[in-house]
Image: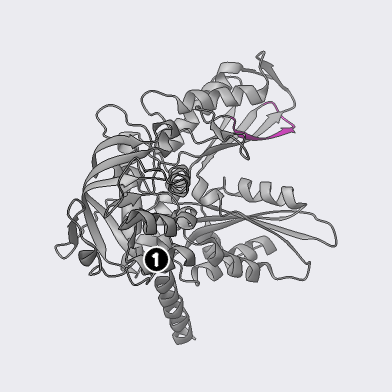
């Protein structure tokens, strides 16, 4: 029998969440580095370089890998012989750990959890409550998996109730392209097969807690049907040519994890949840001897990667930029932004569109300016702003036409692709959309020298800021003619991969 003290669980959860906010699992770092060295697409290779550099910077500076520090998911297995020294429930202990982690003064994490999700959507201010999956098992220990899941990848989760005769690999091949690039590849796919709809989803999420080992599996060969399926899906997805950040390339997924469960004879539930380039999870066991001891990795375990923009890269001054100059920018081109830009996410866009509809004057003049889709982490110490990577741009698509038409906005910066509605509006109004790398939030923040809230302060991290930036790297993702690299890039690399396969045959 073990006696687990309340503070041991609370402290362990809090420490784990701080730990994973700035330390990638080393298996992920190794897998990205291997993919980086194999990659033939320059745009994808550059993106992975930024991801690896950002990862090392976060480990050194103990600041979040991504500005979206996630919704907390906990899988906890409680031994039947365990006794608790606590007056709180296990749920309350875990949530207290989350609270302490997210309010830690040396590394304040972004509170993203909203209560009353279909109504007031009021921020809980401390990122509680966590989503907790509890299981009672034989034994006298408490085993805990803690993960923080960002909205960009979580929102791409898929569930299908397939027919028993349907091909799972074909479903994955068909479904992954519909997820766009907002889940920040390269990452992992967690797949749950069987049970019921909710069981399949939980298994998909739990499978993502496992280490990356697909290359070891390839080397020894599959021994089970599930292992055969992992390899088949891994190859099928990478052959789609989606690539890092959806720019086209050889590596889209680093691993595929599968958990399965018996199911009804008439059913084949299949769930798929991606982990992004800011994959964050930790595992610990409590045995009554005290809180978990999470050993920091050595900085020597990170590869020495440099990213050089080169002399030919276009530097622009956002304070003087004109529509005529923007027309010269080419799809896939790297641009270094300098000067002042505004920020604005979903809530700010919704508010601005409502004000426009009511004939009200906006609190900021957008004419000829650029807006960055970001909700930054609060700064600590001498930072101008905390990690400030881009959010998924497609969420702003429905607002784009109105904003471009009524305000004269010239450019937008976000993560991943734009949908057809936004692309058509960009083309019509001669605007431009630029992509910053998702999963490189701390690196991006180093380009921001000044940050002031200029409108809607009540929205917290969703307020409109004015950033003063120096050499902020972005890629021209949709040019003024409506050409999207997220369409042309994957198509090009899918064709290349297919041609290479034919040559090998």
Q: Is residue 299 left or right of residue 140?
A: left
Q: Is residue 176 above or below residue 96?
A: below
Q: Is residue 349 visible?
A: yes
The quadrant where residue 329 appears: bottom left
- Tell which of 176 and 325 is nearer to you: 325
Q: Secondary structure at mark 1?
A: loop
Residue at the image position 71 percent from the left and 52 percent from the top: 200
The quadrant where residue 489 appears: bottom left
Q: Is residue 234 visible?
A: no
Q: Is residue 322 left or right of residue 231?
A: left
Q: Is residue 398 above or below residue 365?
A: below
Q: Is residue 363 above or below residue 215?
A: above
Q: How many marks?
A: 1
Residue 10 at x, y percent in the picture: 55, 22
Residue at the image position 42 percent from the left and 24 percent from the top: 104
Residue 206 at x, y percent in the picture: 62, 45
Q: Is residue 323 above or below residue 111?
A: below
- Which residue is disc 1 drawn over? 247
Residue 132 at x, y percent in the picture: 64, 34
Residue at the image position 17 percent from the left and 62 percent from the top: 310
Q: Which residues are magenta?
A: 129-140
* Label 1 environment density (alpha carbons within 10 Å; few <14, some 14–19, many ≥20): many
Which quadrant is the N terminus positioned in?
top right
């Amino acid at each position: 029998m073990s006696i687990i003290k309340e503070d041991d669980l609370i402290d362990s959860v809090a420490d784990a969440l701080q730990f994973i906010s700035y330390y990638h699992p080393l298996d992920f770092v190794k897998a990205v580095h291997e993919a980086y060295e194999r990659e033939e697409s320059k745009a994808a290779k550059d993106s992975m370089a930024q991801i690896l550099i950002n990862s090392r910077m976060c480990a050194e500076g103990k600041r979040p890998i991504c500005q979206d520090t996630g919704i907390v998911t906990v899988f906890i297995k409680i031994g039947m012989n365990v006794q608790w020294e606590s007056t709180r429930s296990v749920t309350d202990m875990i949530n207290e750990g989350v609270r302490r982690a997210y309010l830690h003064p040396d590394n304040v994490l972004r509170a993203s959890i909203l209560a009353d999700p279909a109504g007031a959507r009021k921020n809980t201010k401390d990122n509680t409550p966590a989503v907790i999956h509890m299981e009672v098992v034989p034994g006298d220990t408490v085993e805990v998996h803690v993960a923080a899941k960002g909205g960009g990848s979580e929102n791409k989760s898929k569930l299908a109730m397939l027919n028993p005769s349907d091909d799972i690999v074909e479903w994955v091949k068909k479904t992954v392209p519909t997820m766009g690039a907002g889940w920040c590849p390269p990452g992992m796919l967690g797949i749950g097969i069987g049970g019921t709809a909710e069981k399949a989803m939980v298994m998909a999420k739990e499978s993502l807690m496992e280490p990356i080992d697909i290359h070891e599996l390839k080397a020894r060969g599959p021994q089970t049907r599930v292992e055969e399926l992992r390899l088949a899906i891994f190859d099928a997805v990478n052959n789609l040519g989606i690539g890092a950040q959806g720019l086209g390339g050889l590596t889209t997924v680093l691993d595929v994890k599968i958990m399965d469960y018996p199911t009804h004879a008439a059913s084949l539930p299949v769930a798929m949840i991606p982990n992004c380039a800011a994959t964050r999870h930790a595992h610990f066991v409590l045995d009554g001897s005290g809180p978990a001891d999470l050993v920091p990795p050595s900085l020597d375990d990170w590869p020495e990667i440099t990213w050089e923009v080169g002399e030919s890269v276009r530097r622009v001054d956002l304070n003087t930029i004109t529509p005529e100059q923007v027309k010269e920018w080419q799809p896939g081109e790297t641009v270094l932004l300098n000067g002042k830009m505004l920020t604005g996410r979903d809530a700010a866009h919704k508010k601005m569109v409502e004000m426009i509809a009511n004939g009200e004057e906006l609190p900021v003049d957008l004419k000829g300016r650029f807006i960055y889709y970001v909700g930054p982490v609060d700064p600590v110490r001498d930072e101008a702003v905390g990690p400030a990577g881009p959010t998924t741009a497609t969420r702003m698509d429905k607002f784009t036409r109105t904003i471009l038409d009524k305000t004269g906005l010239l450019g937008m910066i976000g993560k991943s692709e734009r949908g057809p509605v936004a692309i058509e509006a960009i083309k019509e109004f001669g605007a431009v959309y630029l992509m910053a790398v998702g999963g490189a939030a701390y690196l991006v923040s180093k380009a921001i020298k000044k940050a002031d809230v200029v409108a809607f302060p009540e929205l917290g991290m969703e307020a409109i800021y004015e950033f003063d930036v120096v050499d902020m790297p972005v890629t021209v993702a949709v040019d003024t003619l409506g050409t999207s690299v997220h369409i042309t890039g994957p198509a090009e690399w899918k064709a290349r991969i297919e041609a290479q396969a034919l040559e090998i045959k």
